[in-house]
Image (cartoon, rainbow, N blue to C red):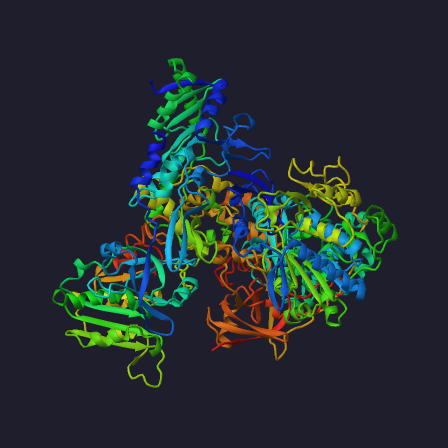
Amino acid sequence: MKDRAQALVREVVPNIYHPYPAFIKEVKEETGDIKTFTLAFADQEIQDRFVFRTGQFVLVSVFNCGEAPFSICSSPTSSKGLELSIKKMGLLTGEIHRYRVGDAVCLRGPYGNGFPLEQLYGHDLLFVGGGIGLAPLRSLIQYVLAKRSEFGRLTLLYGARTPEDIVFEDDLTAWSKEKEVEVVTTVYQANAEWEGNIGPVTNLLEKAAISPSNTKAILCGHPAIISYLVFDLLKMGLAEDAIISTLERNMKCGVGKCGHCSIGSKFTCMHGPVFTYREMKEFPSVL
Amino acid sequence: MHRVLTTCCFCACGCNLYLEVEDGRITGVIPSREHPITRGNLCLKGWHSYEFIHHRDRLQSPLIRRHGRFVKASWDEALDLVTARLLEIRDKYGAESLGVLSSAKCTNEENYLLMKLTRAVLKTNNIDHCARLCHSPSVIGLNNAFGSGAMTNSIAELAGAEVILVTGSNTTEQHPQIARFIFDALAKGARLIVVDPRRIPLSRFAHVYLQPRLGTDVIWLNGMMKMILDDGLADDTFIKMRTENFEAFTEMLRNFNIEDVVTISGIRLEDLRRAARMYASVKRAMIIYSMGITQHISGTDNVQSIANLAMLTGHVEQEWTGVGPLRGQNNVQGACDMGALPGTLSGYQNIADANIREKFENVWKTHLPTVPGLTGIGMFRSAGDKKVRGMFIMGENPALSHPDLRSTRAALKGMEFLAVSDIFLTETAELADVVLPAASFAEKDGTVTSTERRIQRLRKAISPVGESKPDWQILCELSSRMGYPMDYETPAEIMEEIAFLTPIYGGAYYNRLEHGWGLFWPCPNSHHPGTPFLHKGSFARGRGRFEYVRYRPPAEVPDDRFPFFLTTGRIYAHWHTGSMTRRVTALSREGPEAFVEINPKDAKTIGVRDGKPVRVFSRRGDITVKARLTRDVPEKTVFIPFHFAEAPANILTHYHCDPGADIPEFKVCAVRVESVQ
Amino acid sequence: MLGKLILNKEHLSSFLRKIAKEHELIAPVRNRYGDTLLEVVSSVDDISLDLEARPVMPPKGFFLPRVETLFRYQRKDGHYSFKEVLPNVSRVFFGLRSCDLWAILFLDVVFQENLKDRYYLNRRSDTVLINIGCREPMENCFCKSAKSGPFLTQGYDLQFTDLGDRFFVEIGRPRGRELVEKWDYFFRPATSGDRDEQYEIVLEAESKFGQKVDFETAISRFMRYEIDDDLWEELGNRCQNCGGCAYVCPTCHCFDMMDRPVSDTEGERVRTHDACTLAGFTRLAGGHNPRRERGHRLRRRFYHKLPFAQDKYHRPSCVGCGRCVEICFGRVDMIHVIRMVCKKPEGPREASLRLGEILLDAGLISWKELKSTLEKQAGTGKRLGAQLIEDGLATKEEIASALSIQLGIPETEETG
């Protein structure tokens, strides 16, 4: 039995930490510090087999910089494939911002539970996003628009710090032209040309015309804003499991082993990152 | 996989840990459980003391500056160049034009050899090390008062004390294993008095916490002593039998105006009285102190005052009492012991004393320079007037750790020749003409002495990385090339010579250091068991000396242009100039960036939010750094740790020093803080 | 071969020598400095086997090393290549403490649930675990309360009991049987006398493990969220952020993953032990930290090890080895925390003792006066403050002042 067990392990147990080479197909500059990268696996077979759901994330390895989680900001229905919106914050993101089309990175995934589509079908959807938080929401919004008849009204409330910090501007414009879709944006600090709303995104909630009983709210942004939004939405009459958010946590392994993303008795990388407010309530000090 | 027991490379608690070695690499550390200080655990830095050893930034080959850039060179080339240039400068301008900085992180043997090289070969007494910047007042002050400049009792005795007075020491963050003994004492019912201008974490456990204004320690210490005297709590028997100069001291103390405690120091009299009574009314009370007491222009005065206080109450010379200066680097005590100081040879033997010189000259077989040399600060001052033209710096980083960095760096750049030996390319090494790659603590044998005078072994676990060499080998080769052969085969052999010449290390042979947990000096011969607590029965100088100390305010205090106090210091996650700790993942994660602690009230006035950048100006320069709002600093005072090269706190500090110890006043200067838009 | 055997002590070395020739033999060795560590034993004669003390570090480092290279990567001309690092190891652990063995079984579950960890299993698959039951508790041991010792009823490959001149050997899992069958001539079947003797020893040992740690009450308090935030704040102040508890704990397994650059074209992906009590553990790239307060991190740690583990694995993940108790600087260890969590609120007697201490500190009364007043108060039932005032030992103002200074309570009519 001596060597067999070890040999068996090597034969049968896959390497859950192994990333796969991928390359950058396209780079789009959204703002001064946010870029959207379109990626594809180097190995066509892996690329073909790669299937993901809205709200999932991948772990991106950048040479000699480590690995970091990024939400997939495109829908599986999108022809573009895999898109990631990355904000320049530190070593790894700084490095990837220097990359051009054709440069190589490594990927593994998809991880996470994704958005609970079964709970959203047939409902009006209220999306509230702040800053780069629009990225994971975009994947769901694209999906909803691709399967338009299966969902009700779509309202998107989006807030950025300044007009220069607004991401996916083209998408925002395109979406607002769709049927039964309302897109409202706001900024904290306007510039000379800005003609829209000024203030935090929480202000937009009051004006949003939604029917609480049929609406599901999907939120993504800085934790401080989420708490305010949740409070207001509950006051408006939404049920606790009608409020959904995708949480950001420091992740390392992505597969529920390293403990970094633990939240309550669960792991953000496996049982999340999408949680309803009812679930989040169980976790101590989550927001 | 095997394990090698060695001493930690960071602070001077002297923890022993096992380095785990696999395939020629260090893959982990394990604390020793039996070691009396380590007791099965390490602090955050200790647990990660291995990671920087194999970092890719390790200097792997000698570097020589050619046409403004560093070029890899062979050892022969590098050593020949160092030899040639240093001797050239010596011969052209005189031996006094050379300066040597030794390392408090290198072993006793290496400090001894560098001290020997400087004196016997370079023929100058211009040798110093970073104790100048930290505990030189303790060395002088306690020497004046007690006859010996080191911690009087052992660390473990803290657990048996009834009252512990901690001042100017952020013990839980800088000496966690010593704080652990304080916690043990507290669990047994001991009382804790903490005196610190910042609300350090330890203050949360204090039974009495006093928050004096920066630089006013002499005031509250004199105040405390006056209260003890007036309350009749002085230990008259002890004073009569063991001390001298008490009458003159009390005469002057009677004239001390107690109201100064309130007006100058900002401490309420009732609080001070509680502390005074607490400290004086028990038999077993210990004082521990650190940079908050020493890094002032009145550093030596502060230390003398503490000594006064301990003598006044009879809290010295016995077990579970005493005065404990906490040294910060793993071998700063040893470096002092080995005479890497301008005025003393090893064992604090005075270079100006002809008999002492003769003793060394007999063994070293050469004449030694007679005039005490420049201190580490003096060397930089003199560089300005072209007095010191060439320097050899071993394991020190003055380009980040010295005050007034603009002028320090200018002085370094202005040297005709600078050679640096280090394990990483530090800010100082970047300015050098020759850089020699040194071996880390895991790659060589030697001894280091902890703050409680415990001499312990460093043991070689792996071969030196790349082409690096242990400093003792580098020094032997340099010395030989300079015409003075040093043929030591092992560090043990060097220690034999040290033992021969140094009474306090007289019995510190390697075979004795293999068993037990080191030796406390004084250990005069091979049969002596070592001395855990000093001055038993009588002070080293005979009688302890009282000396009244008058208050002198700090050299630079806030004014209209610079309305804030700046005090500098350290944080838990990092060590010294961060050359090692900032290359450790977990430590740089815990302490990722520079910051300035500002009181929220001041932040509001200036218009600064937590986490936003501010610019801090002083007369010497300015830095941009993130604000951290906390009530731990009093109003109109800011705190900046000095570890971070991108926002060096020492750009702001000044060169005014304690007249006796030549220690710069790192702890007090004046700054202006502005929000950055 | 039946499940209970005897190995004479004088044959132990020979048996271990045989094992050491074919496997890596890992046993607790007391080194020349007095520390007992689990070491790889190559020469059975040169070591001092220590079957009584608890090794400084638990065995987890052999399955989840402090630093483990997962793979090496190379990037040349924009193309990546990877090389997995899977060492060949075949190990026999002899002389594990029961709690440490139980911890390995716990780690087995963690690294196989949901997705299997190839690296852990590679190191674990060819391993024989032999524990030796503890006859005497060491200071701080509480395996009995944690239900992971001093003797195990299952999970081991072989369990040894020291019967003085011989070992009682119980065969557990198949690897244990394999090992014994291979070297069968060292063993003889246990007689009923042997069995009785072993049983007596187990009973005696169990009776000696008197340290009771009330996991059940603590866990139920956790689950009902009955614990004040003040408790966590206090613990947060006491915790000195060394990470030691996570490093020495046999079941803590959190790890960090990072790249170690080797050159501009290659590097290594490594994982290292990590501690959830450290601030950076949950900090995000932008600086936001969901568990910024140390007290919150400690709360997370103890929730994870107690009620959440109970919920998931039907037992707390603490095995009662006592290491954290031994080493924690600020007494934020499992025993202290469980006791604090289970403690009832302070009664009047404790409150008056505190007041007395405060007044002593302030120099308002002497020890003698306090002592006699406490005695008197025990009789009259009055509160200490009232008794002192009545006896003229302190005035209402002095007491109020002392209290306000010490407790930071602003002086009002009510204090005192």
- Tell me where residue B324 appears, x and y as whole percent: 67, 51
Left or right: B595 in relation to B522:
left
Q: Residue B248: which quarter of the image?
A: bottom right
- Tell me where residue B516 appears, x and y as whole percent: 65, 36
Q: Across the whole image, how many numbered discs are drawn on residues? A: 0
Furthest-bottom residue in view? Answer: A192
Q: Foreground residue, B174 or C384?
A: B174
Q: Quadrant of the N terminus of chain C?
A: top left
Q: Looking at the picture, does residue C145 appear above or below residue C232?
A: above
Q: Foreground residue, B129 or B672?
A: B129
- Tell me where residue B544 appears, x and y as whole percent: 79, 51
- Tell me where residue C22 appears, x and y as whole percent: 44, 28
Residue C398 seen by the camera:
yes
Residue C173 seen by the camera:
no
Residue drawn at x 57%, y 33% as measured from the top left: C31
Q: Foreground residue, B395 or C193?
A: B395
Furthest-left residue in view? Answer: A149
Q: Foreground residue, B192 or B89?
A: B89
Left or right: A228 in relation to B391:
left
Residue drawn at x 59%, y 60% as measured from the top left: B425
Left or right: B484 in relation to A271:
right
